[in-house]
Image: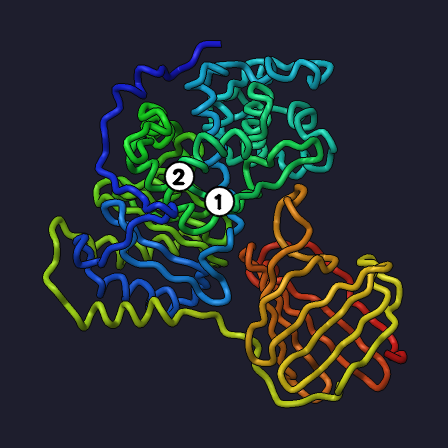
Amino acid sequence: MKPTLTLLAVLLAPMATMQAADATGSLPRSLPLTEGVDPAGIAKFLETMEERRFELHSFMLLRHGKVVAETWWAPYAAEVPHCLYSLSKSFTSTAVGLAVAEDRLSLDDKVISFFPESLPPQVSDHLAAMRVRDLLRMAAGHEKDPQNEMVKSDDWVRAFLAQPLVRAPGTQFVYSSAATYMCSAIVQKVTGMTVLDYLRPRVFEPLKITGVTWDTCPRGINTGGWGLSVTTEGLAKFGQLYLQKGNWQGRQILPAAWVAEATSFQIQQPAKPGSTRPKEEDDQRQGYGYQFWRCRHNAVRADGAFGQLIVMMPDQDAVVVMTSESRDLMEQLGVVWEHLLPSFRDTKLPADDAAQEKLTRLLSTRHLASSNGVAGGTITGTQAFALEENSLGITRLTIANTDKTVTLTAKVGDTDHSIVHGLGEWRLGETAMPGTPTKLGAGTLATAVRKVAASAAWLDASTLELTWRYLEFPHRDTVTCRFDADRVTLSFLSSITVLGRSAPTRPTLTGKRIAP
């Protein structure tokens, strides 16, 4: 197999301006004014995000390779990796680029050549023609993303190859997470390693990005198109790496030619049905690269559902990173153009103590509200309930109520799963409670135990509302407990559903009071 990139391209890559991380791996910090960024513009960006009710979980802004603004909305925190959904695709693309540079595959290799054991009985002309390049460009030839059909099988590769192709590969953009999964499967086939393990010594370790996890399919292949979790600063480093054309601290981590090719225009996306927005104003139609999106203002982004964003702005030498649970990613990106883009200057700005003090105050006081309600309720001390049979397998529920906390314990078999809630405040913990965490996308999680922030409030004397925020995911659950004489009813509502998406369903639990 012949690579489309050569090691010569690596050696000849231009050295971009960069700043070294410190000994701990942290990016260097600076003040906005020092790096030519107006702090008033950053403050207005933060204020506008909250005024328009975008739920951000983290924000980081880099200029000239230095962090000039950063914040996390408590209870989310800097050290906790965040689920990235489709932003994962850009990391899978990076693994493909490295495999090409190592002469392990070519972008023009036929997809069927990697999986002769998984082919359907009849290989169509379209399937025979599909290349790795077509997968990267979201032009595999399907009518729609075959992900939903693919994940019903325990052999996702075989299921993908069995899906009908309605057009010649390479001719039309159709967004496909399944296509990215196939890129992951191909990297694993030619390297003998998962994409995560392959990237670890090549990207994550040189950049000192730690705590990375990635979901897997039933055959142990990283899901590729989703399922990756990385910290906010890890995302900022990844964006900076691409902004620096693959160079990191004097070492060419990625071939500069690959960075240029992956982030350049490769295929045109069609307009969404019913869209009346002119193309020049539509960040969804500026062209697609290899699992990267072109944007207005000569920017490039990696993005994922609910507002996971890395925006690389070469003309401004800047990187913007956000994690969130956003209702509209494009509107969220629009606030970047509205307030951050005009904030960049070509030179150091004069001192503005008032603007910097305001920004510092905003950055240091971001938080997400906990549950609020009335004082007290019908449950005092510790109460136990025997539950009717349910698909979660919970047989017994115990609720312990104090003046500061509510502890809910669910018994499954011989195991107790407890979550401690602060009354009107967040309490941090971990849980493997059945049905948690709520998320989109199939795949096996790296670990069953997940970080949770929980709060509780009595809505009235007989209704207790519990909020569970999964700190490694964008989402939260609202659990409503209603008490009526000796009966209890528990219902679950995911924030995914509140935002209009279809979330995994859980049963309403009912039970009768028993002795604790």
Identify whether 456 is placed above or below 446. Answer: below
Residue type (three-letter) at the residue carrying disc 1: Thr
Q: Are marks 1 and 2 in contact (CB under 8 Å)?
A: no
Image position of 347 (left or right of 291): left
Label 2 sits on a secondary structure element that is loop
Q: Quadrant of residue 267?
A: top left
Of 22 and 363, the residue lying toward us: 22
Tag 2: residue type? Leu
Q: Which mark is residue 210?
A: 1
- Circle 2 Cα neighbour tier, 10 Å, few/some/many (<14 / 14–19 / ≥20): many
Q: Residue at x 33, y 48 (%)?
A: 27
How far across and down, in percent of the image, does residue 292 sit? Answer: 41, 36
* Disc 1 crowd, CA 10 A, few/some/many (<14, 14-19, 20+): some
Q: Is residue 466 above or below residue 348?
A: below
Q: Secondary structure at mark 1?
A: loop
Q: Determine the residue positioned at 37% across, 39% down.
A: 285
Q: For residue 339, what is the image quadrant?
A: bottom left
Label number found at residue 274: none
